[in-house]
Amino acid sequence: MLSDQQKRQLMRVARQALRAAVGSGPVPDLATDDPDLMELRGAFVTLKQQGQLRGCIGYVQPRVPLIQAVADNAQSAALHDPRFPPVTAAELDSIDIEISALTPLEPVSQVEKIEIGRHGLMISCGANRGLLLPQVPVEWGWDRDEFLAHTCLKAGLPPDAWQRDDAELLWFEAEVFGERDLAD
């Protein structure tokens, strides 16, 4: 578990990276001796504007230190999410940032044990792959079956593809926090 201080540091890095991405600030300083922030972890950064998704990019696998993953993905969410035009400097004050620091992916032991709000899901089947973060089914009011179906749909698969023998269903947990959660 990350402390509030660590979460605040990650949020500062994400905000600085977002500003740098749109040319409104310097590149964030990622120097830290905090072993938790230097741990290799998957992470996603979600950008919202007036409560609506504005960008979301992440590393599923732990490729770089958490602090670097947050910086990289804040910039990518702002500039490279193919669902949205790039964020502009004029939008910065209206963008809310949410960070999801992931645990490692593991095979789902029993579908009945998937907990809405606790587990995120990823399905792989052939060349198709889709992932939904733990907060997504909560935001949409989905039950377990809807969560499974939408994870499949996100991968471009039929909604019941998770039941196929050649499908790999993985779960993970995430520490999810936003700027509003850390307000003093």
Image: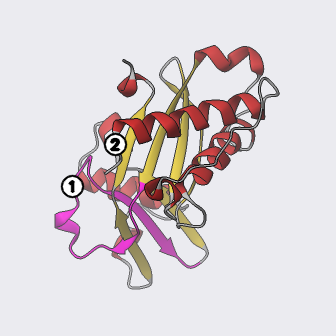
Note whether 167 is above or below 118 in the view shown: below
Badge 1 density bin: few <14, some 14–19, many ≥20, Cα 10 Å: few
Choose mark 2 or mark 1, whichever is in front.
2
- Quarter location, residue 81: top right
In-front residue for pair 137/86: 86
Residue at disc 2, secondary structure:
loop
- The residue to which callout 2 is attached is 3
Residue 136, horizontal then vertical, whole percent: 38, 43
Q: How is the image coloured?
A: secondary structure
Bin the neighbour count of mark 2 within 10 Å (Cα to Cα): few under 14, some 14-19, many 20 and up. Answer: few
Dot 1 lies on which element? loop
Verify whether residue 168 appears in magenta. no
Q: Nearer the viewer, residue 174 or 64?
A: 64
Magenta span:
102-126
Amino acid residing under circle 1:
Glu
Q: Quadrant of residue 65?
A: bottom right
User: Amino acid under label 2?
Assistant: Ser
Verify CB contact (< 8 Å) between mark 2 and mark 1: no
Note whether 58 is above or below 22 in the view shown: below
Residue assigned mark 1: 115
Instruction: Name the residue furthest front.
Output: 33
Q: Position of residue 1 (x, y in %)?
A: 31, 51
Q: Position of residue 125 (x, y in %)?
A: 51, 76
